Image (cartoon, rainbow, N blue to C red):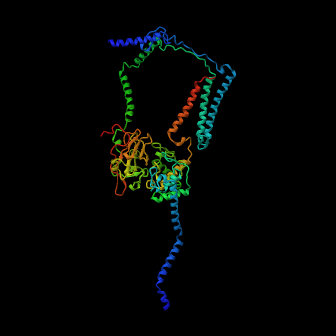
């Protein structure tokens, strides 16, 4: 009993016990929560990867810390949605200094775009890449989307989404064959001349309604020659060129003497 | 006439007659423009002999029986084509399904019914027209003929008879004896012009000018989204945003479309440092500014806002307004800036109008400046 009691009172016992407890807790933690730790590391890796891509491809215009230069705006707070839109549609990197960046061939893989987006999103909070359920146009009301489209979008993008002219050589692009994700991201990020339509103005479900409207418009065949759905200008041009052309042809034939 | 003028004129005349004497291919009797109207015996007639009609050349059909036969067959074929088109039209009208679509090269997938009807009717009409012209050009006589113009004036007998008829008509209808007929007819016809004039004058604009001068915006009216009509909190309007806005009182409007046509407003948020006009900053809230969406040119909705240049473009006639300078006109036919709506926030943070528009919105009208 005495020996036992003496060993129990050994001064190192508490320290050993504490150490043992800590080791067990630590092992248990790493055993039970390994995914979280890995995810955090993966996210950090993605941001690092994105930073490398950024320095190699974007920093010339946007600055080494994405703070912006005279050639390109600051990217703090533009969010992942803006990067996914600009790089995912090939508008960035810019081919050259022009009035407006055009949609062109995409230069990066989807993983690289995600890394770039993660890096830019880590600079300051901004709109994220939207959830797919709000961009596929399913479970949405194209009728309500059409109403919202005519109030908010049609004056620039045309009633049928064919695009239109802006001031000084800029233009609103056509929305035909544009993926729902990019339509959504353009609304939340406001690329180039386009104003922002954030989720407090047009909520995510309403944005999905607009995407559903565009999909419906595109899927419905137009009974007749659309002439680009650009309105009265091409229609008038068609009437002048073909209608008057045919009449002039007949007039020339009428005035000619038969052989 | 004083001496100086006289000298000048004689010099002029002398010079002119020199030219005439030299001869310049027009003959010695040619008249110069500055000589006025001068009778010259046989001045112009000698220079322009009537060339007459060009020699008539017969057509193929006139000299070659085979060619004439060929033309006859062509005309008959064209008329036959027309008959075929008409029959196709009649058959297609009943036979083709009205909702059938078909792929047509150059047009794409389109409505079959209307294309068939249009093309067949076109062929049937065109066949008649082209056939008739071809007939006229190849087979009908093409000999040139001259028909002299006869005197237009009728003979004296006919003229006297016409006057007598007119006078007799007036007498037999008893216009002279019963003047009340003439007066009442004149009154009826004269009065009939009034409905035409009233429509013209009435169409010049509303009698009540007040309805042009005021919108339904009033102090304290909440700004609501178009078309949902939900109120807007100031913190929801992020920089670069644009909201299409109506007054909340549009919900109670008896004529919502008429009222919307005047009260529609565009709400934008700029960086307050970008705003160059103090009044614009004071009438907004923390960079949020509200402007009438109705163009001051002819009233189209000005909705094309570019958030980078802060230009507002009207799609109808390209009038461009600079939002950083109190919507000053920087391009296009509009003559006045867009009116600004003075806004503020209520205790819950919702945007409200602080005052109605201080001037009439939309295009100019005569009484615009009259109190």
Determine the image quadrant of residue B329.
top left
> In the image, what residue occupies the spot 61% across and 32% down?
B124
Q: Nearer the viewer, residue A126 or A241?
A: A126
Image: A178 above or below A15 = above
Query: How far from the left and from the top, in percent, is residue B78?
Result: 64, 29
| B31, above or below B244, in the image | above
Residue at the image point whose x is 58% and y is 36% from the top: B118
Q: Is residue B350 above or below residue B39?
A: below
Name the outermost residue toward the right. B66
Identify the residue at image location x=52%, y=62%: A45
Residue B282 location (% of width, % of height): 33, 50
User: Closest to the observer: B164 or A207?
Assistant: A207
Q: Nearer the viewer, residue B216 or A148?
A: A148
As drawn, is A113 to the left or to the right of B62? left
Image position, residue B1 (x, y; %): 32, 12
Looking at the image, the residue that sits furthest to the bottom is: A2
**Residue A219 in picture, x, y percent from top left:** 56, 48
Q: Residue furthest top?
A: B41
In the picture, which quadrant includes the C terminus of chain A?
A: top right
Q: Taking the image as drawn, is residue B59 in sight?
A: yes
Image quadrant in which you'd find residue B233: bottom left
State left or right for residue A132 relative to residue B243: right
Q: Count all numbered tags in the image, as a single digit.
A: 0
Q: Nearer the viewer, residue A244 or B338?
A: B338
Quadrant of the image occupied by residue A241 = top right
Residue A132 visible here: no
């Amino acid at each position: 009993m005495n020996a036992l009691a003496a060993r129990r009172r050994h001064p190192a016992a508490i320290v050993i016990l504490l150490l043992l407890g800590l080791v067990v807790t630590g092992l248990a933690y790493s055993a039970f929560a390994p995914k979280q730790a890995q995810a955090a590391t993966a996210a950090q890796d993605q941001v690092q990867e994105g930073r490398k891509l950024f320095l190699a491809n974007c920093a010339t215009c946007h600055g080494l810390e994405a703070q912006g230069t005279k050639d390109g705006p600051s990217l703090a707070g533009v969010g992942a949605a803006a990067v996914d839109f600009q790089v995912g549609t090939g508008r960035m990197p810019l081919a050259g200094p022009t009035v407006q960046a055009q949609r062109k061939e995409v230069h990066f893989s989807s993983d690289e775009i995600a890394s770039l987006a993660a890096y830019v999103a880590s600079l300051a909070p901004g709109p994220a890449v939207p959830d797919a359920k709000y961009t596929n146009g399913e479970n949405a009301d194209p009728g309500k989307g059409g109403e919202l489209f005519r109030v908010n979008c049609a004056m620039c993008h045309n009633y049928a989404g064919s695009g239109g002219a802006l001031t000084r050589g800029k233009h609103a692009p056509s929305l035909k064959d544009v993926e729902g994700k990019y339509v959504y991201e353009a609304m939340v990020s406001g690329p180039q001349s386009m104003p922002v339509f954030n989720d407090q103005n047009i909520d995510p479900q309403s944005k999905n309604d607009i995407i559903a409207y565009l999909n419906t418009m595109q899927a419905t065949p137009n009974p007749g020659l659309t002439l680009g759905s650009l309105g009265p200008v091409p229609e008038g041009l068609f009437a002048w060129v073909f209608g008057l052309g045919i009449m002039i042809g007949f007039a020339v034939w009428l005035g000619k003497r038969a052989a | 006439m004083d001496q100086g003028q006289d000298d000048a004129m004689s010099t002029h005349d002398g010079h002119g007659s020199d030219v005439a004497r030299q001869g310049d291919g027009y003959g010695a009797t040619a008249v110069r423009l500055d000589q006025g109207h001068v009778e010259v015996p046989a001045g112009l007639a000698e220079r322009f002999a009537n060339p007459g009609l060009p020699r008539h050349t017969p057509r193929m059909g006139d000299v070659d029986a085979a060619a004439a036969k060929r033309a006859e067959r062509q005309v008959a074929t064209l008329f036959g084509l027309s008959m075929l088109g008409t029959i196709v039209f009649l058959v297609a009208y009943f036979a083709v399904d009205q909702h059938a679509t078909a792929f047509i090269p150059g047009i794409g997938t389109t409505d079959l019914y209307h294309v068939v009807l249009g093309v067949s009717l076109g062929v049937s009409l065109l066949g008649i027209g082209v056939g008739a012209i071809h007939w006229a050009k190849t087979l009908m006589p093409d000999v040139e003929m001259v028909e002299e113009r006869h005197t237009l004036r009728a003979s004296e007998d006919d003229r006297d008879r016409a006057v007598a008829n007119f006078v007799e008509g007036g007498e037999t209808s008893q216009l002279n004896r019963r003047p009340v007929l003439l007066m009442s007819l004149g009154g009826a016809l004269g009065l009939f012009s009034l409905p035409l004039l009233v429509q013209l004058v009435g169409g010049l604009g509303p009698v009540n000018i007040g309805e042009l001068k005021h919108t339904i915006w009033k102090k304290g009216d909440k700004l609501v989204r178009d078309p949902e009509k939900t109120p807007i909190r100031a913190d929801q309007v992020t920089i670069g945003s644009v909201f299409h806005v109506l007054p909340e009182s549009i919900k109670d409007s008896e004529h919502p479309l008429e009222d919307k046509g005047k009260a529609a407003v565009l709400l934008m948020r700029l960086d307050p440092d970008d705003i160059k006009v103090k009044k614009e900053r004071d009438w907004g809230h923390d960079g949020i500014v509200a402007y009438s969406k109705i163009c001051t040119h002819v009233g189209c909705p000005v909705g094309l806002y570019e958030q980078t240049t802060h230009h507002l473009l009207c799609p109808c006639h390209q009038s461009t307004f600079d939002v950083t300078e109190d919507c000053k006109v920087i391009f296009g036919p509009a003559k006045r800036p867009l009116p600004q709506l003075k806004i503020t926030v209520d205790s819950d943070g919702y945007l409200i109008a602080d005052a109605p528009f201080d001037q009439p919105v939309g295009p100019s009208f005569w009484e615009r400046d009259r109190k």
